[in-house]
Structures are given as structure tokens and as C-alpha cells.
Image (cartoon, rainbow, N blue to C red):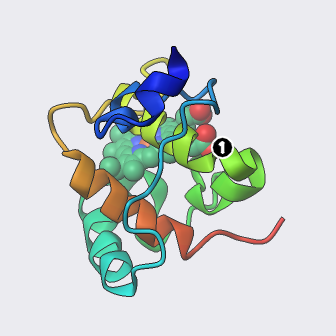
Amino acid sequence: MLALFFDLPGAMRYARADDPAVAAKNPYEGDASRAAAGRGLFNQYCAHCHGPNAFSPDPPRDLRRLKRRYGENMANVFHFTVMHGRPDKGMPNWTGRLDDDTIWTIFTFLQTVQAEP
Ligand code: HEC
């Protein structure tokens, strides 16, 4: 059943942070001009809570730790968290405010600033 969703073009919509079998995938992975655009979008939408260029002194908000924290599941957790937010923790949900294109462009930037474990 889940394998069926996996091949659909809209598969990213079904991605869940707790279900690596339905993997969210960044369509722009490794694209340097996307990463540059993503830095600008990040600073516009996210930096007032997560720090300019994703440098935050507060570990739960430090998005340079996504890879260290979630490893291969990083894209899933990122996409799920941005779509659904964490209302109890102060992370807004961006569904209807940022489209998938923008979300993955921001992620492409974040991939370039991940700190080594
Ligand atoms: C109003 C403040 C605020 C804004 C704006 C905000 N966030 Fe967050 N975000 C938070 C907080 C606080 C957390 C930490 C939640 C926790 O402690 O689990 C968080 C957590 C996250 C996480 C999960 C981090 C982890 O390691 O589990 C991701 C991914 C994330 N935010 C992405 C974004 C992106 C992308 C944007 C911009 C589109 C954004 N956030 C904008 C407050 C914000």
C-alpha cells in the first residue's frame, strides 16, 4: 500500500516523519543556485526564530543539526515539521503559506550548512 504512494508524483504529500518507507525527497539536491535562493528565503521566513543563515545558539532551533539528529530521515522530518509545525513548541505550520517548491529550496540551502556529527 505504501509502496504504491511512493511512485506517485505527489508522494511527498504523504511523507511522514515517522515513516521512512515513504521518503520525502528533495528534487533540487545539490543545486547550488537553489541553495543560494534558499538562503534568501530562509532569512526571510525562518531566521527570526532559527537565526540568520541558520546559525542559532539554541540547540532545539539550530537547523545545522538536522543531519546529526535525523540522518537519512532528515528530509522526511524537515518536510513533515514544516508542513505540520510543532504548535506546542512554538514552531508554526507553513501549509498554505509556502509551497513545496519554496520548502525544498530552503531545504537545499540547509543541506549546505549541516555540521558534521
Ligand atoms: C515563530 C518562530 C519560528 C519560525 C518563524 C520558524 N520556526 Fe522552525 N522551529 C521553531 C521552534 C521553537 C522549533 C523547535 C521545536 C522543538 O523544540 O521541537 C522549530 C523547529 C523546526 C524544525 C525541527 C528541528 C529539529 O531538529 O527537530 C524544523 C525543520 C524547522 N523548525 C524549520 C523551519 C523552517 C524551514 C522555517 C521557515 C520556513 C521555520 N522553521 C520557521 C520556531 C520557528
Quadrant showing the C terminus: bottom right
Residue 92 in view here: no
Outermost residue on the right side: it is 117
Q: Residue at x 33, y 82 (%)?
A: 36
x 46%, y 69%: residue: 29
Tell me the element at label 1.
helix
Left or right placement of residue 27 versus residue 60 in this view? left
Coordinates of residue 88 in the picture (x, y in percent): 49, 17
Q: Residue at x 44, y 41 (%)?
A: 79
Extreme residue toward the top, this view: 1
Number of numbered discs visible in the structure rendering: 1
Closer to the camera in the image, 61 or 38:
38
Q: Residue at x 48, y 77 (%)?
A: 30
Residue type at the position of mark 1? Asn
Mark 1: C-beta under 8 Å from nearest atom of ligand 1: no
Quadrant in which residue 23 is drawn:
top right
Residue under label 1: 73
x, y percent for residue 7:
42, 37
| Residue 91 in view here | yes
Q: What crowding class fits label 1: few (fewer than 14 Cα within 10 Å), some (14-19), or many (20 or more)?
A: some
State the image coordinates of residue 62 (x, y, percent, origin top left).
60, 56
Question: Where is residue 47 shown, x and y percent of the image?
Answer: 37, 60
Q: Is residue 28 left or right of residue 23?
A: left
Say left or right for 106 vs 22: left
